[in-house]
Amino acid sequence: MRKISYRTEHLPMRRKPWMAGIAVFVGILAMSSVSHASQWCKGQVTSVLTDSGGNVMVFTTFRQDWLQVCNITVLWKGVTTDVCKSWLGTLTALRLAQEPAVLFYTEDTACSAIASYGNAPAPNYVAIDTP
């Protein structure tokens, strides 16, 4: 019987299919973190108001100025009226309970420097902060 020997340096490397998926995921993750930063702004809601036009605004400890978050009568910066009414309820409950809120923004502006009043960007979500 003839002995067959293989030299490993000439054999093609067997790739595992899941490794390609991981490489793609890591690449996308790296590109998205470079091109876009997000802010989770956390603080007390000290005041909530709704004006005659339906604009919902909050005064928070992280901004120390009024921020519009939505409008209960018309679509505002992509936030629907149903979502806005839910946020108004959440923000009012947080104000009454004196519990912190989290407003998530996709802008890379610091929470303390977000534009005020109607110039503020719309948050992507409003959350009750949990310990």
Image (cartoon, rainbow, N blue to C red):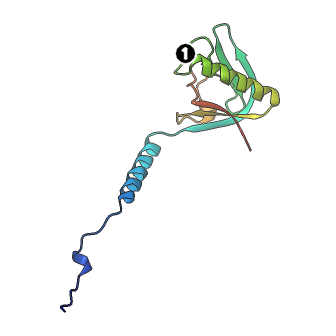
Residue 130 locus on image (x, y percent): 73, 41
Please state, as top left, top right, bottom left or bottom right, where the C terminus lies in the image: top right
User: Relative to residue 72, is residue 94 drawn left or right?
Assistant: right
Quadrant of res 43: top right
Who's the residue at 73% across and 20% down the image?
Answer: 48
Establish if 102 lies above or below 17: above
Secondary structure category for the residue under label 1: loop
Instruction: Name the outermost residue toward the top.
Output: 52
Please state, as top left, top right, bottom left or bottom right, where the N terminus lies in the image: bottom left
Quadrant of res 102: top right
Depth check, front residue: 79 or 34: 79
Instruction: Name the outermost residue toward the front.
Output: 1
Residue 113 locus on image (x, y percent): 60, 31
Depth check, front residue: 100 or 75: 75
How packed is label 1: few (under 14 Cα within 10 Å), some, or many (20 or more)?
some
Who's the residue at 39% across and 53% down the image?
Answer: 21
Residue 87 locus on image (x, y percent): 66, 24
The reply to whether residue 53 is in sight is yes
Instruction: Name the outermost residue toward the left.
Output: 2
Quadrant of res 38: top right
Establish if 90 lies above or below 72: below
Establish if 115 lies above or below 13: above
Q: Amino acid at mark 1?
A: Leu
User: Relative to residue 131, is residue 106 drawn left or right?
Assistant: left
For disc 1, the marked residue is 75
